[in-house]
Amino acid sequence: MKKIAYYLLILFFIASCRSYQPLSDLESGIVNGTVLDKTTNSGIPNATVYLLGNEGGGTWGGGGTASFLLDQTTSDAAGNFDFTFDYNNDYGYYCSAIAPQYFNYNEEIPVGDATFGANNVELELQPISYLELHIKNVNPFNNYDELTLSYTYNGSYPELIGNEVDTTICCFQLLGNESNRVVWYVEKNGEGTSYFEYVVTPAFDTTYYEILY
């Protein structure tokens, strides 16, 4: 009888061990992650990182209720960050980040709750580059020649009219470390033609490009 009781105790102990599930980092009130440059995968230092909560399961761009700020911090020299907070099972948790010289898309990234002892969120930011355009009418027809750019500059699409156009516009913000499609439309003698060219623009730098029409 004692042996039976002994074996039952062992079986109960084994079953208890198997049913035990450790808390994830999120359930323990820990969020840790890294802010990364989307084009180089390197960490971004001194980024401002936000911890957001949401009671309706939606985000700013995804419908549902709006997220609310729980905490904010700054990434270290390697782009790492962490939050410690009181976990609430009724909330969905998200992180967002901004940094100088990076586009701010207000993207909210869900925080994973199935990781243990590892980063549970990665935030990728797109670097900014700048384009300086020199635009010159080298084959004028008359004073009604017109060139229209497809990129906004100070909130408008530049239109250059005349047969003596020779100007430089600086600077348009484009995706850094990417091949950007530069598009323009030319109308001369009552006929219009669209043109485009792909221009590689290094991050944080200004690329010079000429449109001669």
Image (spheres, rainbow, N blue to C red):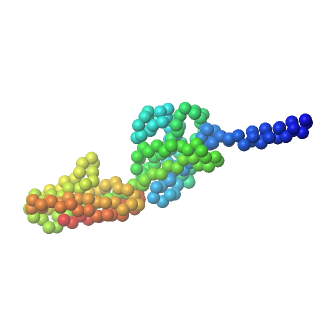
Residue 3 location, x and y as percent? 90, 39
Whether residue 196 sits left or right of residue 161 in the image: it is right
Q: Residue at x 52, y 49 (%)?
A: 122
Hey, which quadrant is residue 132 in on the image? bottom left
Q: Residue at x 42, y 55 (%)?
A: 127
Residue 156 location, x and y as percent? 24, 48
Whether residue 170 sits left or right of residue 15 in the image: it is left
Residue 71 visible, this orientation: yes
Residue reaching furthest right? 2
Q: Give the quarter of the figure containing the N terminus.
A: top right
Q: Nearer the viewer, residue 209 or 18?
A: 18
Q: Is residue 129 above or below residue 111?
A: below
Q: Residue at x 70, y 40 (%)?
A: 19
Residue 24 location, x and y as percent? 63, 42
Q: Is residue 37 above or below residue 85?
A: below
Q: Residue at x 50, y 38 (%)?
A: 52
Whether residue 212 sits left or right of residue 54 in the image: it is left
Residue 69 visible, this orientation: no
